[in-house]
Amino acid sequence: MEWIPGGDLWVRHRFKIGTAFEWRQMYIGGLLDGWFDDIKEIGFLVGGGAKVGDSFDLFLQWNGSLLDVGLNVMIGTVRVSSIYQFPGFGAEFSIGFSWNKWGLEVFYGFANESFHRFGVKLSKRFGKKTIL
């Protein structure tokens, strides 16, 4: 759910569905997302990456027009991420904490003077592994 102050729809409900496949230290995945009130506006994201040891994770993501290059650093239950976006330039930084099957992440990103984003994400893992 997203809150858009002053917009026609103050609260919009977003859907996201994705999958990922892991093989050895590499993985690929995809994601579809959109809004329940405008189902015709569906976006996508595809990507892949590689784990380097137990502490580092390098990845690429593409949504049809923008390429993201990122790095995750994991130390125990803490994850620090940085993502850089091209063409043009954008960046996002986040810190996340996990316990049992729950995760909490805070992020801040910017792409230019007109685009900034800040958010908090709460997640729950199902099954034995989660890679994204």
Image: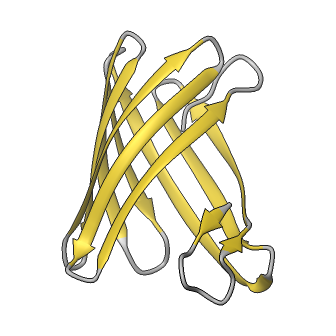
39 relative to 102 in the view: left or right: right
- Extreme-front residue of the structure: 6
Colour basis: secondary structure
Q: Nearer the viewer, residue 65 or 92?
A: 92
124 relative to 77 in the view: left or right: right
Q: Which of the 4 image quadrants contains residue 38? A: bottom right
List x then y, in percent, for residue 131.
55, 32
Q: Is residue 108 above or below residue 106?
A: below
Q: Residue at x 24, y 78 (%)?
A: 87
123 relative to 73 in the view: left or right: right
Q: Is residue 97 above or below residue 95?
A: above
Q: Quadrant of the N terminus?
A: bottom right
Q: Is residue 79 above or below residue 117?
A: above
Q: How many marks?
A: 0
Q: Nearer the viewer, residue 127 or 79?
A: 79
Q: Residue at x 38, y 28 (%)?
A: 51
Q: Residue at x 62, y 11 (%)?
A: 100
Q: Quadrant of the C terminus?
A: top right
Q: Residue at x 26, y 72 (%)?
A: 111
List x then y, in percent, for residue 39.
80, 81
List x then y, in percent, for residue 57.
35, 32
Q: Which of the 4 image quadrants contains residue 21? A: top right
Q: Nearer the viewer, residue 62 or 121?
A: 121
Q: Nearer the viewer, residue 130 or 113?
A: 113
